[in-house]
Image (spheres, grey):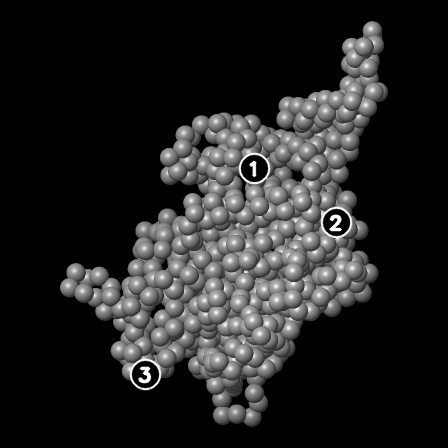
Amino acid sequence: MPRDDDSARDSAPDLQILGDQITLQPRSYVETRRPDDHDEEALMKNMARFRSEPLRFLREVSLYVSGTGWRAYDNFIGRPIYYAGFSEQMRNSVVSAPLLRARISQLADKRLEVEENEGWLRKDDKDYAVKRAHRRAVIESGIRDVAEKMTDDMICKFESKTFIRGAYYLVTQLLTRAYHQVGSFLQHAGAMWIRRSFGNDTLYTTLVQAYIDTMLQGGYNFECFIEGGRSRTGKLLPPKFGILSFILDSILSGRVKDAIICPVSTQYDKVIETEGYVTELLGVPKKKENLADFLSGGSSVLSLKLGRVDVRFHEPWSLRKYIDEQLTKLGKSSDTKDLTSKTPENAVLKQKLLRTMGYKVLSDINDVSVVMPTALIGTVLLTLRGRGVGKAELLRRIEWLIARVRAKGGRVAHFGNAPLVDVVRRGLEVLGKDLVGEVQGLAEPTYYAVDRFQLSFYRNMTIHLFISEALVSVSMYTRVKQGGGPAHQEISYTALREQVLFLSSLFRGEFIFPSEGLAANLEKTLIGLENDRVIKLQRDEKGTIESIGLSDEERVAGRENYDFYCFLIWPFIESSWLAATSLMGLTPPVHQKEEIWIEVAQAQNTAQLLGKTLYHQGDLSYFESVNRETLKNSYQRFEEEGVIYAVKSKDGKSPPRLCLSPEWRAPRDPTSGALLASGKLWDFIERIASSRREGKNRRDGATVSTRVLRLTDALGAQLFEKAAAPESKAESKLSDEEADKLKKVVKAERRRRKLEGRAHL
């Protein structure tokens, strides 16, 4: 649905940087070529090499060391940094924070209590008070030393402008990623080091909170990556709430008055690691990075043609104001100090605030992100029928896609006034022949997807713009794929709404949906598709939508626009279907008397093996659907919906385990013990399957169901056998403590699902 002009004017501007001049352009701005225009210039030019240009090389080094011009690092937004004594001042501020002092005192009291119980301190001694005070001072001093060491290992070391100038020069020449060997280097350049897991270390948790408080109280800028890692699929990952929870607690407690959030989108024409991502998603363990590999292969990486990087900034917003707005919506008091008490109600409310905050940041990142030329090419190639596409047709569909992106309020990367044909040519060069091939000796240049798995990374960069249209289209597909005349392919509004609601709930952890709610967003999406002449809406005399079908124009055009939206999301539907089908194999065998718990990793690996087998046997349409990331997300959703139960060990020594919820277990033939295609789980699988793509390579039917179930059951039997084996790393049974904890979790999840209801599109 096109956004109105007012929304475009009110949105965050683009930055045009040329030399030392910065110009603000509205997001709807379209470049026009003027007679005095020059070609687009790179923001960072190539640096001189000592062998070829020794004098220029030495001059450049001297400019960085002396801090000439913009290299001085004097004029920047934010509090003063990079001066002698900064690290010591920050360390003292953190260690002396009231929050941390209170935690140290609390830990000292706990230790004294232990020593008294063990007889180290006797209350009947006449000098008990003196001994206790002395012992308390010793314990607090020891804990304080530990806290100071933790702080020194964690905080940024902004001590020298000369260092950061040299660091910038070195990074731009050598480093493409962070390694353990350069940890100290990065810490002095502004990196903050925190543990991946805090466990039950309350001192460390409080220390990190005190550091965040100190930075926010001092007005320092700091950057965090909300996704927590690199996306292997090309689309945004669900938010990681670690750092965000500390920031939120700083505001809610009143220790910090406000924090200004500025979401940033960074996108690339080509990502170096896509080939490695594919192997990881197919189940090959990630190869550990090391300095030797970088030094041996770094020159080849730096010589690659990787295109351009596009960075966009969303309009900053006040976290304090956002919290107040959310509390008002929930009918709560804006006095957040009431939330500091640890009650179940406050815990639920704080968790809700944290989740909405995290997804708002991701939504804002999506709003300002741009679609790169390589993403346009990858999207078009993977949403067309047939083996390949001619050059003229490729240009036509890319031009159409650009128009649709802008109509949806999205941004397309500036092309520097270059014609579209040149932009596509450069995009094809960046992608390379390993991803996009060209058939030689034909009447017209014809291109085809060589590696569809890798290209899906670029297609996924656009999917967030069209997720509503995609869900509506595949929901209509439940009738469209039945064939027949136009009237036979129409779907009622009620049936469409139910399927859209089902799919949006299924993909709640996979995509970021608009926040208007199902009814408003569904109607807006349908009207938008009607205006684009993709669908036709049948209304009653009151104007209420009764049924939906393909428009006559779309049928004449061969369903190319309707198919585009379906092709975007079909691989994800396939993956969810695969994950759900793999759960059938977790139904315990007939002869099994006791509950056996399966390692989560082994269950997901088996689901991947099932997917690869079904793909090569023709029962799965997309090889990318077997990727580990999407299967993992599906399993997470199944756990949230109570389809599977999962437990994690308290100490982390035993791997996470799962079992299929009793009410979701499939029935078995009483004679043969074979799985039957019926029951609650099978109905769930069939509902997903109703939106799956059909074609010449695949048709649903009883024979297919029997074959798939037989294979799933065989793989499941192997899982149960491995779990029960003596050499298994994980316990196949739950301890009493784990069983009690599981009961509480299941009860809490049921209550949450009743309160929250289903996710809305």
Reading the image, the residue beneath label 1 is 247
Mark 1 nearby-residue class (10 Å; few <14, some 14–19, many ≥20):
many
Q: Residues within 10 Å of mark 2 (few under 14, many from 20)?
A: few
Q: Residue at x 63, y 34 (%)?
A: 209
Q: Is residue 684 above or below residue 13?
A: below
Q: In the drawing, does residue 622 fall left or right of residue 190?
A: left
Left or right, 691 with respect to 238, comes to: left
**Structural distance between the alpha carbons of marks 2 and 3:** 58 Å
Q: Is residue 555 left or right of residue 17?
A: left
| Mark 2: amino acid | Lys
- Location of mark 2 (residue): 653
Mark 1 to mark 3 CA distance (whole Å)? 57 Å
Return the residue at label 3: 484
Residue 606 on image: x %, y %: 65, 68
Earlier sequence position, callout 1 versus callout 3: 1
Q: Residue furthest left?
A: 541
Determine whether label 1 and label 3 are within 8 Å by CB: no
Say what amino acid the circle numbered 1 marks: Ile
Secondary structure type for disc 3: loop
Sooner in the amino-acid sequence: mark 2 or mark 1: 1
Instruction: Using the rendered view, name the quadrant where residue 223 is placed.
Output: top right
Q: Percent position (x, y) of residue 265?
A: 53, 54
Residues at marks 2 and 3 touching, judged by CB atoms closer than 8 Å: no
Q: Is residue 165 above or below residue 636?
A: above
